[in-house]
Amino acid sequence: VQKRLGLKELESKIVTAEEAAALISNGDVVGMSGFTRAGDAKVVPMALVERAKNEEFKIDVYTGASLGPEVDKYLAEAGAIRKRGPFQGDAGIRNLINSGDILYVDAHLSHNAELVRQGIIGPIKYLILEAVAITEDGLIIPTNSVGNSPIFAEYAENIIIELNISHPEALIGIHDIYVPGEQGKREAIPMTDAMQRLGDIGIKVDPAKIKAIVISEEPDAPSLIVPPDEETQTMANILLDFFRDEIKAGRLTKQLMPLQSGVGSVANAVLDGFADSEFEDLIVASEVLQDAVFNLIDAGKVKFAAATSITLTEELQQKVYGNLEKYADKICLRPQEISNHPELIRRLGLISINTALELDIYGNVNSTHVSGTRMMNGIGGSGDFARNARLGIFVTKSYAKGGAISSIVPMVSHVDHTEHDVDVIVTEQGIADLRGLAPKERVPLIIENCAHPDYKEQLWDYYNRAVEATGNHQTPHLLEEALSWHVNLAKNKTMKKEVAKA
Ligand code: 0RQ
């Protein structure tokens, strides 16, 4: 502890988790560190769970992104969360959001910091921030995520530090904390290369704001991705072939452009596909570094990887955190405002790969709402990247729930990424390159290349009748039927219907 707490005047602030939790009041807006189950505040939230069992206690919780079970399961299920933002990914809190017990603000992850600056999120009474160390000059060194912690730390009235001594000291030096100033007075973000460092190794805070320090040894909950299967492998191969064609066309080189890949099993599998490829000197400029990125560093394919969090399975946690020195000069963790900044995504020319739940015959994508109403996880950073990337790619299997659901529908039941933000779609069936195409040019590519064979005829039937009924409008739809596939699913547990043969 002595070694990790450089600023000696703070030693008197060391308290138990219960004492720290007692500082927070019913009704407070609380910021917490953590991004995709990495770098979460853990022990103080668990002490809040105990409080909520014995007294009326509800707070608003804002984080970087999804947290592990301490907050997004136990604190939620204790009834202690009134409002949650900007992202979650746990069945516990998801169920409470969808039963109306918790309000959920699902937002672009790069937008949060601006909302804090404007006071829309706030006033933040407390920030609970997991740190690996506090330096002599008072810099707070976050653990394996940065997320929104720098902006929360700037605006929070009070800060509680969870000094987690189980995280390796080798984390010190991998963060790059740069916080843009007020809009209107702000300089251009001085990054022209994804490997550049811009800021400090830690978060500068006024030590007077630090009201408590709790020593913790709680590990992060491991990530839950499942390994690649035959279909995700096929999707990876399709995507690699697409990149090869782009190289032939002179639009990309073997180094590609900086890669962003979303969370989840499919996105991880697609990245894994690079391991046996000819691509090299790849740079990852993403928001989450999952297992695949470290495997690609080991395979000599990735030369640098920047993000705002490192989220690993148990197996990879041991391998990476046990040998962090080996990766230290190849990785960098930034605030999510920077990793997801539209200015940088556009300037650096990112290739972004994110996952859809469903998409429609014109290329609109739903990544968040099952059948239009039930929240899955949230938009996360997928919108930050898709809209601003050089190449916005969406991947999904062509079907879900054993084939009862077609991931390609006449009209998406909720729109996260509009047709204007979607360049390329990949399913295990094939690829649709939509760039430069008008809506009616996209339809045959999406249906023929991407839809599951069981649903192709049904999609054509819808489209052909829509063209006829509208007199060939720009974007033909049968409004009374556009969502009928979802209605059929709700009633009959399948999207399949008998199609009258033309
Ligand atoms: O449910 O496990 O109960 O069967 O959705 O689907 O195919 O396992 O895919 O794990 O990659 O998650 C979009 C949710 C995909 C995720 C989403 C069901 C399916 C399964 C999961 P079961 P898969 P993944 C960076 C970027 C938005 C945020 C984002 C996500 C479950 O990738 O949240 O991209 N993305 N952030 O059966 C009903 C459909 C369905 C369906 C799949 N059409 N209808 N259920 N499922 N398609 C990270 C951050 O921003 C932090």
Image (spheres, rainbow, N blue to C red):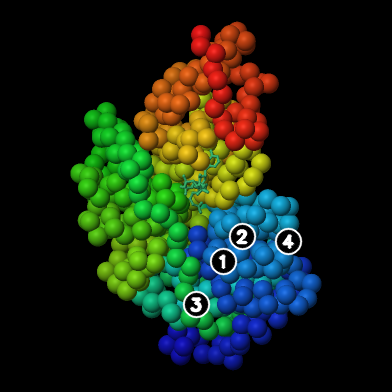
Q: Indicate which disc, 4 or 1, sits on the residue closer to the N terminus.
A: 1
For disc 2, the marked residue is 92
> Which disc, if any, is residue 218?
3
Q: Nearer the viewer, mark 2 or mark 3?
A: 2
Q: Are marks 4 and 1 in contact (CB under 8 Å)?
A: no
CA neighbours of label 1 inside 10 A, class few (<14), some (14 to 19), many (20+): many
Q: Secondary structure at mark 3?
A: loop
Farthest-out residue, right: 56
Q: Nearer the viewer, mark 3 or mark 1?
A: 1
CA neighbours of label 4 inside 10 A, class few (<14), some (14 to 19), many (20+): some
Q: Is residue 379 left or right of residue 155?
A: left
Label 4 and label 1: CA atoms lie apart by 17 Å
Q: Position of residue 33 (x, y in %)?
A: 55, 67
CA neighbours of label 2 inside 10 A, class few (<14), some (14 to 19), many (20+): some
Q: Amino acid at mark 2?
A: Gly
Q: Indicate which disc, 1 or 2, sits on the residue closer to the N terminus.
A: 1
For disc 4, the marked residue is 82
